[in-house]
Amino acid sequence: MNRRDTLKTLTLAGIGLSLPLPLLSKDNKDSNSMDIYRQNSPVYHFKIGKFKATVISDGQSLFPAHPLYAVNASKKEVAENLKAYFLPTEEYLLQCNSLLLERGTEKILIDTGAGNSLGDGFGLLNKHLKLLNISGEEITSVLLTHCHLDHIGGLMVNSKPSFPNATIYLHEKEWNFWSANSIDLKSMPIEQGFRDNFKNAVATNLIPLNNNIKTFRDGEEIINGIQVVAAQGHSPGHSCFWIKSGSDSLLHTGDIFHHPAFDLKNPYWATAFDQDAKQAYKTRIRILDMAVAERVNVMSYHMPFPSFGHLTRKGKAYGWLPSNWIIAE
Ligand SMILES: [Zn+2]
């Protein structure tokens, strides 16, 4: 997809707003100003008991701050929130971060990035895996929080499976919804062309891997130490994963929330991608309260890299405390 196509397909219905993608791309005229950032590592390592965990960036791009990530808030409210977080008030930097878990010969990947489904700026997961000297063939399992295009887009590259030896795990409700003959995305307040992008991403990336797919249910321990936490709303079978090893644990919250200035500060704000916004809100509150009460480490797919930290609550608002970035020397 070239830039013009991306702009065209991401135009929002009824709002007349085009997403200025990809402002961070290589062909942007201000590209040189990004060079210093290209020296930063796109991977971050930490441990969860016996798991070696690595957050791997799939990339980033700028989106208009309103209304995509707060469809039921005013532009002014969003701008005020972003200003309070010392962020640009018009644009929001969307990041996608996969999690790799290694234990013995197991190499488990949670979500696969956007591939080429969101235009330039994303689709870097495979390149960044190579930085770790890990090939796609070595991945033993892929766990999907859900099947939105920014999470499944890396499953296939040029019509070939990126992880040919992996079993792909997803919730049975998610599989049933996306593999049906008719996929109804009308509840998402986006233009039909954008909805079609979601369907195309599933047809291109997920359906061809039918034989490698294994479905799970709420509460199931899919792999030793990795348990499903029911989290439906954002999509019909959206799931969180609770990863436990010894006394360590990490709750992977998928797309329960997207950014501290949006649905953490105002958890009733819905994104345009919440397929059932009411259910998504209930789920958000339930999971956030659980994470706060348990004081558990949290990884969230769209939080600023390395998207790893803790949650707090003050009144109705939640806060995000990024974990320390630990260096060896
Ligand atoms: Zn997402």
Image (tube, rainbow, N blue to C red):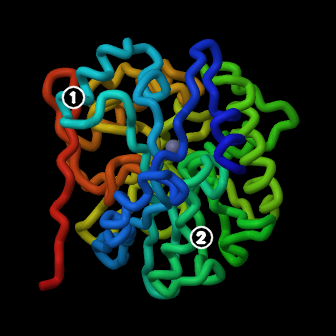
Identity of the amino acid at label 1? Lys
Residue 311 position, x and y percent, is: 22, 43
Which quadrant would residue 188 be assigned to in this image? Answer: top right
Label 2 near ligand 1 (CB < 8 Å) = no
Instruction: State whether residue 3 is above or below residue 102.
Output: above
Whether residue 294 is visible to the viewer of this picture, yes or no, is: no
Q: Which mark is residue 141?
A: 2
Label 2: how many Cα within 10 Å (few below 14, some 14–19, many 20+) = many
Residue 179 position, x and y percent, is: 79, 43
Which quadrant would residue 182 be assigned to in this image? Answer: top right
Helix, strand or loop at mark 1: helix
Mark 2 or mark 1: name the one nearer the start of the chain.
1
User: Left or right: 229 with respect to 27?
Assistant: left
Residue 325 position, x and y percent, is: 19, 66
Label 1 near ligand 1 (CB < 8 Å) = no
Label 1: how many Cα within 10 Å (few below 14, some 14–19, many 20+) = some
Q: Which mark is residue 83?
A: 1
At 47% from the left edge and 58% from the top edge, which residue is drawn? Answer: 59
Badge nearest the viewer, 2 or 1: 1
Helix, strand or loop at mark 2: strand
At 34% from the left edge and 54% from the top edge, which residue is drawn? Answer: 299
Instruction: State whether residue 324 is above or below residue 172.
Output: below
At 49% from the left edge and 41% from the top edge, which residue is drawn? Answer: 230
Return the residue nearer the eye: 138 or 79.
Answer: 79
The residue sitting at the right extreme is 181
